[in-house]
Amino acid sequence: LNTTFYQQPVIDRMGSAINRSIESLSGFGFLSVTNGTNFVSRQILGEEIGGLYTPQYLGRQENGSPLIEGSTSDVNLERAGNSLPTSDIGSYNRLVKGKWELNFLLRGSTGHSLLNVTRMIHENSPAFPSFENIVTSGSDPGLNQTVVSDLYVEDASFLRLNHLTISRDFSISSKSTLNVSLTGQNLFTLTGYEGIDPEVRYLDRNQSFEPYQALASGIATRELYFPSRTYTLQVRISF
């Protein structure tokens, strides 16, 4: 079992050759359904790197609108989560008994959060009425409007069985052997995250201007499809 722990540094100075008094830098994060820019992933002077800052969701009003404190353009927002993990875990195991062999890889990350944009857009968005079919434990079916808030920032810690292979050797003759193996990849993921994939998002490659990509970590945008689960049967003959 290999475990790496991370202590995120606190930003103690920021600036450039032009402006030496910068107090925050933001990635665009993503474009809202109304094509507005939401600055969710921010690097703020005096804070740890990788912060996610959103307005607070306080509940639903009688007319179905969300009750929100703050806006994404506010400078002083509460930190809703951290886009970077506090630890990575990996465990490769190989077990052999007679002619049987089993090996598998468990891998995971803990302590990071993700802004679940897929859930935010498709739970309650009036812009996509025919796609409002996502229901999670955090859903509020009475909402009739999508607004960026900490309602959609989720703990994305996970443990995943990356692959597992089981194989057996068979003797054909004194000089020949047959090996049959079955491999499964992405067999299961243990997580409380209710988006498509809880993997850490270090970059947002949707940003056309590359320097912004690293400033928009922790944004689980909608272009990602479900990770596939695959099975491979292999037969190998040795002479």
Image (tube, rainbow, N blue to C red):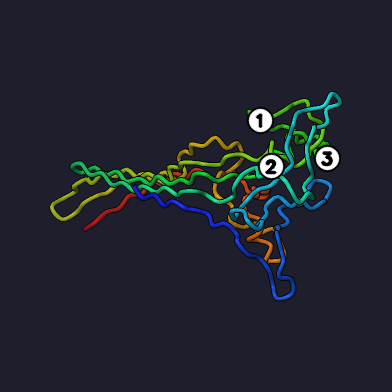
Which amino acid, mark 3? Ala
Point out residue 34 in the picture as x, y percentages from the top left corner: 84, 47
Q: CA distance from mark 3 to mark 2?
A: 13 Å
For marks 3 and 2 on the same chain, the one whose residue lies earlier in the sequence = 2
Classify 10 Å Cα crowding around label 2: few (below 14), some (14-19), many (20 and above): some
Q: Quadrant of the C terminus?
A: bottom left
Q: Quadrant of residue 213?
A: bottom right
Q: Secondary structure at mark 2?
A: helix
Q: Residues within 10 Å of mark 1 (few under 14, many from 20)?
A: few
Residue of label 1: 138
Q: Is residue 147 above or below residue 27?
A: above
> Residue beneath label 2, please?
118
Could you say whether the residue bearing mark 1 is in a helix, strand or loop? loop
Along the viewing direction, whichever of 152 and 198 lies nearer the viewer: 152
Amino acid at the residue labelled 1: Gly
**Callout in the foreground (1, 2):** 1
Q: CA distance from mark 1 to mark 2?
A: 13 Å
**Farthest residue, direction left:** 174
Q: Earlier in the sequence, mark 1 or mark 3?
A: 3
Instruction: Say which amino acid is labelled 2.
Output: Thr
- Please give the label number shown on residue 87: none
Q: Which mark is residue 127?
A: 3
Neighbour tally class for label 3: few under 14, some 14-19, many 20 plus, Cα within 10 Å? some
Looking at this view, is 144 or 40 the one in front?
A: 40
Q: Residue furthest top?
A: 62
- Residue 18, position in %: x, y? 74, 74
